[in-house]
Amino acid sequence: QVQLVESGGGLLQPGGSLRLSCVASRSNFSPKVMGWYRQAPGKQRELVARITNDGVPYYADFVKGRFTISRDNAKNTVSLQMNNLKPEDTAVYYCSAGPGDNSYYTPVYWGQGTHVTVSS
């Protein structure tokens, strides 16, 4: 059993920056892909960004140029640096992991979620 634990959420003003982090509880856990999803109130969960175990990232169009995903395989962590945040980025952000490659991703493991609120 693997647990993914997120941290770093919070409340901030538009234009601000925030860094989310996620660590896997099992030391020998090495998923092909790790990623971040988000779910805003009343909306479906959507992919924000994912990264393969060899460091190839993918971003949803709505975060390109603002968010950066990174991964440390030795530490079993994945991070999401979010810059120039907008009110529409307000959501619960979920860390995930599972099989995949550069062209597809099937999240199997999920974190409990961390809240990000962008408001003036």
Image (tube, rainbow, N blue to C red):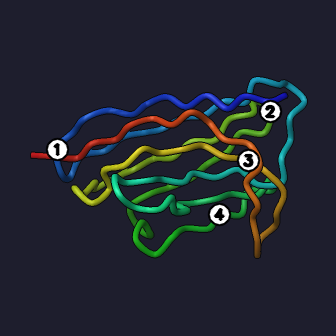
Q: Position of residue 64 (x, y in %)?
A: 44, 70
| Residue mark closest to the camera, 1 vs 4 | 1
| Residue mark closest to the camera, 2 vs 1 | 1
Q: Nearer the viewer, residue 83 or 11?
A: 11
Closer to the chain start, of discs 2 and 1, is 1
Q: Residue furthest right?
A: 28
Q: Residue at x 86, y 41 (%)?
A: 30
Q: What element does badge 4 sit on?
A: strand
Q: What element does badge 3 sit on?
A: strand
Q: CA distance from mark 2 to mark 1?
A: 34 Å
Query: Residue at label 2?
Result: 74
Closer to the chain start, of discs 3 and 1, is 1
Say which amino acid is labelled 2: Ala
Say which amino acid is labelled 4: Pro
In the displayed structure image, the side of residue 43 where residue 86 appears, left or right: left
Query: Residue at label 1?
Result: 13
Closer to the chain start, of discs 3 and 4, is 4
In the displayed structure image, the side of residue 76 where residue 57 appears, left or right: left
Q: Which mark is residue 57?
A: 4
In the displayed structure image, the side of residue 10 where residue 47 appears, left or right: right
Closer to the chain start, of discs 1 and 4, is 1
Query: Residue at label 3?
Result: 97
Q: CA distance from mark 3 to mark 4?
A: 14 Å
| Residue mark closest to the camera, 3 vs 1 | 3
Task: Tell me where residue 116 sits by quadrant.
Answer: top left
Q: CA distance from mark 3 to mark 1?
A: 29 Å
| Residue mark closest to the camera, 3 vs 2 | 3
Q: CA distance from mark 3 to mark 2?
A: 15 Å
Q: Are there few (<14), some (14-19), or many (20+) residues within 10 Å of tag 2?
A: few
Q: Residue at x 65, y 63 (%)?
A: 57
In the displayed structure image, the side of residue 50 where residue 29 appears, left or right: right
Closer to the chain start, of discs 2 and 4, is 4
